[in-house]
Image (cartoon, rainbow, N blue to C red):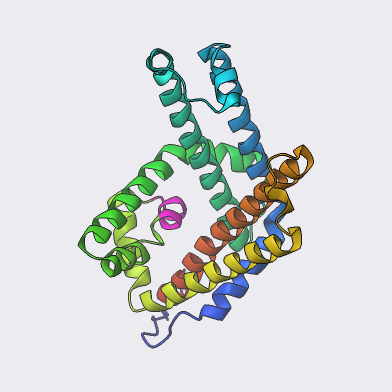
Amino acid sequence: MAMTVDPTEKLEIMRTIKVTLDLTRRRFGRFAALWGLTILACVLLGTILVLAAGTSLLPQIMSGHPPKAEMILRIWPIFALGLLGLVLLGAIEQAAGLHVALEEIAGRQTTLEENIRFGLRKALPTLGLTLLLGLAYLCGLILLIVPGIMILIALSAALPAALTENLGIVQAFRRSRDLTRNNRWRILGFWLVVGISIVLVELVLAILTGGLTRNPDNLGTALIGIALSLAESMVVSALSISGIVALYAELRRIRDPQA
């Protein structure tokens, strides 16, 4: 006998948060590994591009003086290439991280190599979908702030749906609209709780460090500040990926209990 969807069941915010935290805890090591590899790749890319731009660029960057006009004209193609490379690396890391979380929540273990291969294979679709999501959000903001937020909420399940269910962009948008229907205010509440929690963590870190890491004249405190910023970014990235996947899994459980 086929199972039917219970139209009265709603997204449980605290349950979704619990799934998010549990997913982050179980796979944090893998998220951290992917994030660290991405940072190393970005540093390597930046080093190569600076060297390609010529030795005269680095002293100007270190001195804090803006590059001269002729130098800007000479290096802008290198800068554009670097920006494109950074965007692609970000898309690879995002797709690979989503693969980790999606497979984990489905009860399947993956290797780091499998995650990276998936990220490489899905980088362009992930980037295209992310850019279109940003464009849709921008269009909503142009109308009014609330429509922009609600558009973003309605399409918040598009990326995991596209990667899991092998959907095209238009199909992924439609699927996300269906999954989020009747739960969009609850989804907004979920992300507000997650966002407030992240702000509180940042506040606690600022209090614990006492602002010492903001002293630009001390190399030691500057390095500590950089390390704390990187660690904070890594935790936020892991929580964001886990939150997206946990939300998608809960919405799919409600809408498609037979899946």
Q: Position of residue 248 (x, y in %)?
A: 47, 65
Say left or right for 231 vs 92: right
> Magenta stretch: residue 160 in it?
yes
Q: Position of residue 72 (x, y in %)?
A: 41, 18
Name the residue at 54% across, 11% down.
54
Say left or right for 150 vs 198: left
Name the residue at 72% across, 42% down.
222
Query: Front-most of 118 and 91?
Result: 91
Q: Quadrant of residue 70?
A: top left
- Bounds of the magenta segment: 159-166
Q: Quadrant of residue 14?
A: bottom right
Q: Is residue 175 above or below residue 48?
A: below
Res 110 visible: no
Q: Is residue 191 above or below residue 27?
A: below
> Magenta stretch: residue 175 in it?
no
Res 12 visible: yes
